[in-house]
Amino acid sequence: MATPASTQQALDMVLAGLSYLAAADPTALTAQAHADCLQTLEQAGAITTAARARILAAFTTGHGYAADADYSPTSWLIHRTKVTKAAARGHLGWARRAAAHPQVIAALAGGTVLSESMARTICGWTDKLPESCRDAADAILVAAARAGARQDDLAALAAEIYARSLPDPDDDPEPDFEDRKLRVQTTFAGAGVIAGDLTPEYAAVVTAVLDALSAPMGAEDTRTRDQRYHDALEDAMR
């Protein structure tokens, strides 16, 4: 495979390859070819996200958008790349992650370790950690993903990292947990209601676990956030 000699040549090759695939007749391909295309396109999407994040971060830092008389990178993206405001903000979110999560971005750039959606989920998990812990947590989760860990495994690992990052309750000379309580009541037809007052430390752990296990499972996942929390609690209990 030829190696591009310049950035422009690389862009031309990317567009040529994608145009070829977009024009191909999928009905003429075998199921294995479909699978190969879908897997490779997912890898390409991950690499594209990493490349865009790094380039957009540099473009934003250098105020490149000002040369086109745009007042912000969001405005430039909307006017010059024809994306919606939501898409522009999404791209800028990745540009910020390029600085905050370099190891996740590097894994994305490799194309085979993380998908774009899984990388976003990992960044969301480690963003909840103290800043001093994030880089190490990213490294642990990326290494686990590289070793073959699945989403549930990564979620459990992220929850454990979060729990370990919390202050030791023994450091409080006079902890007051007398108001803590939890009630599970069974109602009509066996349905249940949970209510209670949690300590701050336990509330943080519960939130971390539910957030980790309730990530949307792709565009086809139409569950509400509350429904995903319900299912996440079931997964955690099992």
Image (cartoon, grey):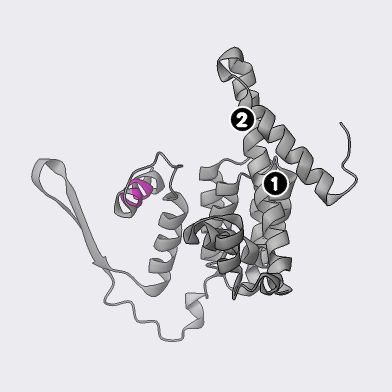
Q: Which residues are magenta?
A: 228-233
Q: Which residue has dot 1 on it?
A: 47
Q: Residue at x 74, y 73 (%)?
A: 62
> Mark 1: which secondary structure?
helix
Farthest right residue?
Answer: 5
Q: Is residue 230 magenta?
A: yes
Examine the image and state in which quarter residue 102 appears. Answer: bottom right
Q: Say which of marks 1 and 2 sits in front.
A: 2
Asked whether residue 139 is in view, the answer is no
Q: Is residue 153 above or below residue 88?
A: above
Please name whichever residue, 28 or 71, is drawn nearer the observer in this view of the structure: 71
Quick check: 191 left or right of 96? left
Tell me which amino acid carries mark 1.
Ile
The numbered disc on residue 22 is 2
Task: Classify the position of the N terminus by image quarter.
Answer: top right
Tell me which amino acid carries mark 2.
Ala
